[in-house]
Image (tube, coloured by chain):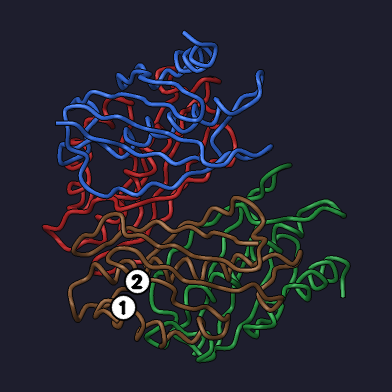
Chain colours: A red, B blue, C green, D brown
Amino acid sequence: MSDLHTRVANSFAAQGLMATIGARLAMVSEGEVHIELPFSGALSQQHGYLHAGATTSIVDSACGYAALTKAPPGFEVVTAEFKMNLLRPALGTHYLAVGRAVSSGKLLTVCTGELRAFT
Amino acid sequence: MSDLHTRVANSFAAQGLMATIGARLAMVSEGEVHIELPFSGALSQQHGYLHAGATTSIVDSACGYAALTKAPPGFEVVTAEFKMNLLRPALGTHYLAVGRAVSSGKLLTVCTGELRAFT
Amino acid sequence: MSDLHTRVANSFAAQGLMATIGARLAMVSEGEVHIELPFSGALSQQHGYLHAGATTSIVDSACGYAALTKAPPGFEVVTAEFKMNLLRPALGTHYLAVGRAVSSGKLLTVCTGELRAFT
Amino acid sequence: MSDLHTRVANSFAAQGLMATIGARLAMVSEGEVHIELPFSGALSQQHGYLHAGATTSIVDSACGYAALTKAPPGFEVVTAEFKMNLLRPALGTHYLAVGRAVSSGKLLTVCTGELRAFT
């Protein structure tokens, strides 16, 4: 595994929530990180779809780690804010959150994320 | 319990994610809903604070149910979009998400939510 | 000009603000609309760059018209909400706002927009 | 006028866009700034209401100046991002944008803003 992957994987392993919901680090490259999540009723909202909180959990982590791959060694990133659009019900047997760094500055890195659902 | 409380409690009980993270419906009134969450390492991000995904999960549910208290009987609500600002690290032994309906229309209801941390 | 262009151009011409700031409808296709804006000191913020309000004006109109190209004949669109990220100072002699419809539903259409600066 | 008011007023006077749309600095106090705007057809969207871009212009400036009142002397602020919810058509003879600093950090200040319409 590359240094980049190790850096992200170590931090990912320290996120208790990722284990709790069953998320897995799927891909790390410079500026882009993927996180995989199998569907489970334990993650549902009231109609049985994936809860927006579960969606947000993996998209936020994917975006945060995409930002981390752009940060100098030794630096950490934390989320300051984000916006989610829930385009349609999150139906699927598993999901992939794709986070990408769009613009990386000294203080702020802006990322885009998307959730893909697979049936 | 009031009809309003029952309506929200039934839907809350159907949200698998709320049980998974240990959240509890704390208060329901017209236009305002509170959800309580004890801290656990199972909900952490990499520095040991509450993960933004856990924060979002209870704030989103609190806001959604605040909107539901304003909806005509028989109607359901789903989240179309939201914006989160993470003002500081979410440190606490337990948290309270407060969701409030600000403006309620035929198609869209706008809510504000906040997370309070208790030590 | 296509019917689509005429439909958008008629509405654009009724937007007083577009004339006030000097914006021009540059391109209309199904799901994508471009609006052009020459820089002027009359549109500046305190450091002489384009004010975020001017940026927003043309990006919002471009996105709104991108949504309109997806709406059935006779329907109108209005903006319910948006999020802006200002990645860097808006420096340029002219700007192009590009609005694109991402997801078009019966009640809500979600668009992405960007501002390009030319020197 | 207080030093605080002078500091904000000088910067406001340098914003070309505020003069172009006819906005006026109405109140400055620590953490809160008001900007007034009379309605004019020159600021309209296609149905004759205030364009979201004009709304955003004064709410963004009001929030930016609310943040500036919390910044140490000699510091400047710029907008990194914002979210707007347009709750109903902006109908009125004049408007007041109210910006308030909610949380003020070393790198980021978070503000809330609202637009009030008067008939």
Q: Quadrant of residue B17?
A: top left
SS assignment at label 1: helix
Residue drawn at the location 47% of the way across and 66% of the way down:
D59
SS at mark 2 in the image: strand
Kind of residue at badge 2:
Val
Instruction: Please provide percent x and percent y for residue B109.
Output: 58, 39
Dots 2 and 1: beta carbons under 8 Å?
yes
Q: Which residue is mark 2?
A: D28
* Residue A108 falls left or right of residue B13: left
What chain does mark 2 sit on? D
Please tell me whether residue A17 is drawn above or below residue C49 in the rendered image: above
Choose between C90 and D106: the one closer to the eye.
D106
Residue D92 versus residue A104: which sits nearer the camera? Answer: D92
Chain under numbered label 1: D
Instruction: Give percent across and percent down for residue A43.
Output: 41, 23
Real-space Cα distance between discs 2 and 1? 6 Å
Q: Residue at x 32, y 58 (%)?
A: D110
The image quarter containing residue B28 is top left
Looking at the picture, which amino acid does disc 1 mark?
His
Crowding near pointer 1: few (<14 within 10 Å), some, many (20+)? Answer: some
Looking at the image, which is closer to me, C83 or D53?
A: D53
Which residue was labeled with disc 1? Answer: D5
Q: Residue at x 30, y 81 (%)?
A: D1
Q: Residues within 10 Å of mark 2 (few under 14, many from 20)?
A: many
